[in-house]
Structure formats: structure tokens, C-alpha cells
Amino acid sequence: MSKNKAIFNWSGGKDSSLTLYHVLKDKQYDIKYLVTSCSEQYDRISMHGVRVSLLKRQAEAIGIPLKIIYMPTMPTMEAYDSAMAKILTEFKNEGIEYSIFGDIFLEDLRKYREERLAEVGLKGVFPIWKRPTKELAQEFIDLGFKSILVCTDESHLDASFCGRMIDNQLLADLPPKVDACGENGEFHSFVFDGPIFKSPVQFSVGEKVRRTYAKPKNLDEDKDCTCCKTSDTAFWYCDLVEKQEAVV
């Protein structure tokens, strides 16, 4: 029996890894590519700030081909939608019918994704949708995944959280209003080992930097999309550098 051909929207983080684990375990989909949006200017994963070299090591350790979509820094929604429509159409022409996401509860984001996919004839799949985030975070740890926080939103978490490993102590230390999976953008992570990896991704921890971003003016135009409601804010980034020795 042939499986459904799909792409997997890969961020390199915790939710993507746990979702991929379940998809591979269920064996319903034949994942042709991991697909990741990256900054053309910085050669890093968009939002997460992880170097593309480490993203490539992840894909190699997982064993699924990687497709990188390079985007300009802070693209307009029109530019982003146009670039995505182009690559999604290419996937459709290869016979791919499904696009898998690790989203959990952001209704506006799911609606946006499904509408864009429908325009090119693809269907969205959300394997961990509406599962309790504390339950997901605990499952991630219990399965043996290893992950480090690479980006934290200063309005939710202080600088000390950036660079910490995701473990039970981290979950206990998160402020009450911070989602256990960072689903509201409170933090982003890089997963370097776990049941979906053939071997750990080797890296060393580099410098920690603070960056401030202004609210993109074009996002005000979409009054119905709460996932695009953002304001001037600061983020802490923990740089990771690829290396050949054991993980520090």
C-alpha cells in the first residue's frame, strides 16, 4: 500500500521534532522533504537564528532530504506568500499532496496555512493539534530528545533562559504565563539528539546576543490575523557553532 506523499515543515525545534517522531511512527505519510525558511542575508533559520550548517547536519542525521527556502530579512506578506506559492507549486507538480506542520493551538496561523495550501491544491496536516502543551513538553523529554533554547522573547523570559537545555527543571522554572511549548513565540529551540536522529548533531555554544526588532508596518494591514499582531520587542539569541567533537 502506497503512502501519502508529503513535505514536512521543519523548524529544527522541539515541536517539529516531536511531530516528526509521531509521523514516522504512524507510517501514513512518505515524507519527501524537510522544508525550512531561512534568512538569505544571515544564512540562518528564520526566527530561530540557527546556522544553516547545523540545519543541514540535522537533516543528514534524520535521513530526509532538506529543501531550504531563502527569504529576505523581514519580507512583506506579499513577498513571503509569493515565494511559498512558487515552491509549493513545485512540490505539487512532483505529486506531493500534503504539508505537515507542528502547530498546536494557534487558530489564525492554521487558517492562514490552510488557505495558502488550498490555493495550490495541497492539504495541511497537524498531527499534534490541540494536545495539551505541558503534556507534549513532558513527552518530548521522556522520549529522550535533547534540545537547547536558542532564542527567547525578552518580554516573556529573561536572558538566563537563553542557552538552557530543555529538561524538567526548565519546565519547572518557566513563568506561569509562558506556554510549556513556547507556542506563543516565547522561545525557540534547536534539537540535536533523540529517537529520530541516527547520531547527535555536534555543536559548541557560542556567544549570547540581544537583538531588537521593530514592528513590521505591513502586518497592520491584516486586521483578522492575530498571529501577526506583533510589537517592537527584543530577543536573546544563543549562537551555536558546528564542530566535530562531542557536544558541550
Image (spheres, rainbow, N blue to C red):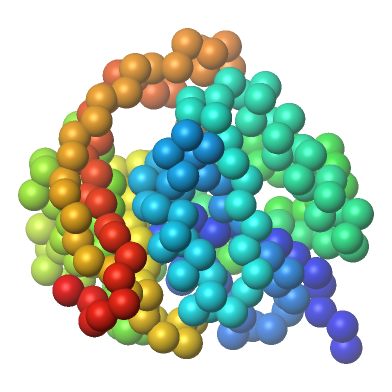
Going by the image, does 121 lie left or right of 179? right
Compared to 168, does 172 lie above or below? above
Q: Is residue 160 left or right of residue 68?
A: left
Residue 221: where, in percent of width, then height?
57, 11
Q: Nearer the viewer, residue 6 or 229?
A: 6
Q: Is residue 42 left or right of residue 232?
A: right
The quadrant in which residue 54 appears is: bottom left
Q: Relative to residue 105, is residue 112 depicted above or below?
A: above
Residue drawn at x 11%, y 68% as measured from the top left: 169
Q: Which residue is depicted at the point 61% across and 52% down?
A: 68
Q: Quadrant of residue 143?
A: bottom left
* Left or right, residue 109 beside residue 28: left
Q: Position of residue 53 (x, y in %)?
A: 44, 60
Q: Residue furthest front?
A: 244
Residue 105 higher or lower than 232, as above or below: below
Quarter of the rendering containing residue 34: bottom right
| Residue 50 in sight here | yes
Where is the N terminus found, in terms of image quarters? bottom right
Q: Residue at x 24, y 44 (%)?
A: 237
Q: Position of residue 215 (x, y in %)?
A: 38, 17
